[in-house]
Amino acid sequence: MLVKICGISDIESAKCAIDNGANLIGCILVPNRSRTINHEIAKEISKLVKSKRTKQLKIPNTTNVNEYFEELAAEISRTGPYLVGVFRNQPRDDVIRIATELELDFIQLHGNEDKLEYLGYGFGVIPRYIIPKEHELLKEHADILVGQLSLPLLDSDLGGEGKTIDWDYINEKLDVGSILAGGLTSENLPKLNNIIGFDVSGGVETNGKKDLNKIEKFIKKGRSIQ
């Protein structure tokens, strides 16, 4: 199972996440948020992430939707870590410029922007879908995302506020391999059909700051779920 630690804003937390086996390191690049990262620190984290990579990622050659995202998640796990920049309803030119300057591996799109417009810029794309409201949109996009360096991410309407999705809905109706976000902690990680990874931010914090012990515990628990 992939593990993404999001809201990283300092070198110590990034190093802790990487050393404990996080596959994806997420940095908030939306202006004026509590977890927004300083760009100079982001550049240092980018260098750190790249220094830990020794293997080349290969895009799976299957055209089967479910197989594709599972195989891509396995490839990311095998070859990572990777750096993810999180954006929300920002001008596309600004997003691409920042992603280029910080040498991001993935762009995560957390707003109402057209996610498909970001394919083909040389970055992986993690589009966020609000479940269940955007389930049909996810299914429409899935066929297009096959063959791309892209993994769907599922979140609640109030992403970033610790609210969980309807896990019963996901377990019964989700038919596209996706990363699960929303209110996760090391104590409540579920085993659900078609979930290929976990994304956490607040669930590894104490008093609004990243807690190294919680990061370590979450990664260990998340990666143990098959």
Image: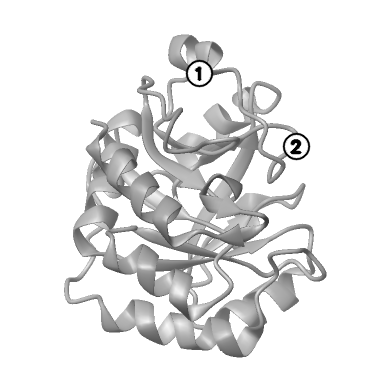
Q: Whole-percent x and y of residue 114? A: 70, 51
Instruction: For residue 149, say whether it is visible.
Output: no
The span from disc 1 to disc 2 (Cα, nearest Å) is 17 Å
**Residue at the right extreme, as displayed:** 32
Residue 158: assigned label: 2
Q: Which residue is drawn at 49% across and 75% down?
A: 104
Residue 198 in the image: above or below residue 108? above
Is 110 situated above or below 182? below
Residue 220, image x, y percentages: 28, 46
Task: Check disc 2: other Cα within 10 Å, few if <14, some if 14-19, many if 20+.
Answer: few
Is residue 89 positioned above or below 152 on the image?
A: below
Residue in the image at 40% along x and 86% along y: 47
Its colouring scheme is: one colour
- Residue type at mark 1? Ile
Position of 49 compared to 96: left or right? left
> Helix, strand or loop at disc 1?
helix
Q: What element carries label 2?
A: loop
Query: Could one spot residue 14 in this view of the protein?
Result: yes
Q: Position of residue 213 (x, y in %)?
A: 40, 56
Badge 2 amino acid: Leu
Quarter holding the C terminus is top left
Sequence-first disc among 1 and 2: 2
Given residues 200 and 131, the one toward you in this image is: 200
Between residue 151 and residue 31, name the one nearer to us.
31
> Residue under circle 1?
170
Q: In which quarter of the image is the N terminus?
A: top left
Q: Local crowd at mark 1 within 10 Å, few (<14), some, or many (≥20)?
A: many
| Residue 202 appears left or right of 26 | right
Question: Which numbered disc, 1 or 2, marks the residue closer to the eye?
Answer: 2
